[in-house]
Amino acid sequence: AQKVTQAQTEISVVEKEDVTLDCVYETRDTTYYLFWYKQPPSGELVFLIRRNSFDEQNEISGRYSWNFQKSTSSFNFTITASQVVDSAVYFCALSGTSGSRLTFGEGTQLTVNP
Amino acid sequence: DAGVIQSPRHEVTEMGQEVTLRCKPISGHNSLFWYRQTMMRGLELLIYFNNNVPIDDSGMPEDRFSAKMPNASFSTLKIQPSEPRDSAVYFCASSFRGMNTEAFFGQGTRLTVV
């Protein structure tokens, strides 16, 4: 069985603050994939990033960065200099080897206040 | 390039009525997913098609739910008869290949059964 835990249900920050969203996962697969999705108030889910279990290199994309640590089974997401438009629910997700379903965490509601 | 297209965006129906949700995946994507999102249960995978064939329908709640994919560019999710507890946002998503590639979501159908 696989599981994704996003312990932070809600986070509220002031614009320009940095914020880190935590994601911890459990899986028995040696090959697996981790994802982050954003769900803005408009409702659709937007793909942000996909990483495979063999690539622990951290990634930066503009103000977004991801820290993948297999030793702690974590795949945390940091937004630098947050903006009001970053306000959304963010989901971490995990899929395993072929045939395994994509498992979503419960999501973290991020509110960035002006 | 059009994304995943779902219709209708909103549906209000009376208990006992049949409801049909429609989805057009991204052209060239081989996999299609139906998800349900509720406050209580989060995002749940209902069914997953690969090359128009249902691969995993273990998430379909009960016999009242059925899904079809007659061709690569169209899928339906049908609920008959509908019940108030079916009220949720239903998302269709497609991916290039399976669970391990990024999924692109439609805007969802908000279903309300009264």
Image: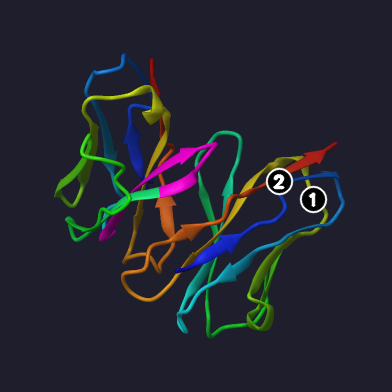
A44, above or below B71, in the image: above
Q: Mark 2 points at which residue?
A: A86
Q: Does the magenta stretch include residue B39?
A: yes
Res. A6 visible in picture: yes
Name the kind of residue labelled 1 in the image: Ser
Range of residues picked out in magenta: B29-44
Q: Mark 1 lies on which chain?
A: A
Q: Where is residue A68 in the image (x, y as percent from the top left)?
A: 65, 75
Q: Is mark 2 on a helix, strand or loop?
A: helix
Q: Which numbered marker is on residue A4?
A: none
Residue that numbered label 1 is attached to: A82
The residue at the point 50 percent across, 41 percent down is A44
Q: Main secondary structure of the magenta part?
A: strand
Q: Who is closer to the viewer here, A56 or A69? A: A69
Give left or right: position of A65 versus A33. Answer: right
Q: How far apart are marks 2 and 1 (CA)?
A: 7 Å
